[in-house]
Amino acid sequence: MADKFCMVVSEGSLDKALMPLIMGNTAAAMGMEVHVFYTFFGLKLLKKGMKPRLPGMMSLFTGIMVKKMKKLNIQDYQTMLKEARELGVKFYACSTSMSMMGVKDTDLVDGVKVLGASAFLNLAVDSKRTLFIG
Amino acid sequence: MHGYDITAGEMLLDKDATLDAKGLMCPMPIVQLAKKVREMKSGQVLELLADDVGAKEDVPAWCSRTGNALVGMEEEGKLIRFYIKLK
């Protein structure tokens, strides 16, 4: 059985958006089974067509960062997300956060499973590593 | 057996496919590598070209993790050629 690798994402800024995808896509490419759980402000990252911005005041410089990434041939958020799903990375949305943030099932990208903490912890306790990104 | 290790030079003649990952930054060379390997058969040799500085550590780590053999590695300035024999 493949090694399991889990991540919890609780922030929705560009840096917190890219980190789990970079780590997750790499882990999937290394043959690991990857599970990412989005909660609190992280949840919005799973909304369709999401373009995350830099945190706080730096938000104003998001366009510069995105342009720089493009120049460096680094994939943008949506491309990385698509890649992750092609690689079989599993995405989960926290059910409580969905009510808190007013996010509906239909707002989410396809293939996201809505679940609660216990279902995710059930996966996480069996995984070799769990990272918290927030 | 002549007792020599296989050199990258010899491997050049025997490669079954080449993946050009030049200009791609971490983790793209590894992601592309994993995808390419899925299309190939056991025992085949893949040549991977990369110029991301991280690749020098990342490709050997990927090989040891996935059980594929890194049979050669050549550096030419920034460019690194990896030769990977698939398990």
Image (cartoon, helix red, strand yellow):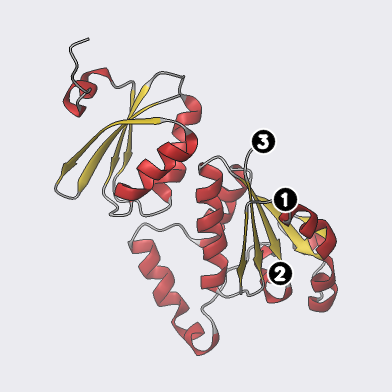
- Image x and y of residue A119, in percent: 83, 57
* Badge 3 and badge 2 in a common chain: yes
- Disc 1 target residue: A126
Q: Is residue A21 above or below residue A52?
A: above
Q: CA distance from mark 1 to mark 3?
A: 12 Å
Mark 2 nearby-residue class (10 Å; few <14, some 14–19, many ≥20):
many
- Write the residue at 74% across / 50% down: A111
- Disc 2 target residue: A43
- Write the residue at 19% across / 50% down: B78
The answer to whether residue A9 is left or right of residue B30 is right
Q: Is residue B81 visible?
A: yes
Quarter of the image for residue A95 reads: bottom right
- Image x and y of residue B60, in percent: 36, 41
Residue farthest to the top?
B1
Q: Chain of mark 2?
A: A
Mark 1 and mark 2 lie on one chain; the one further toward the N terminus is 2
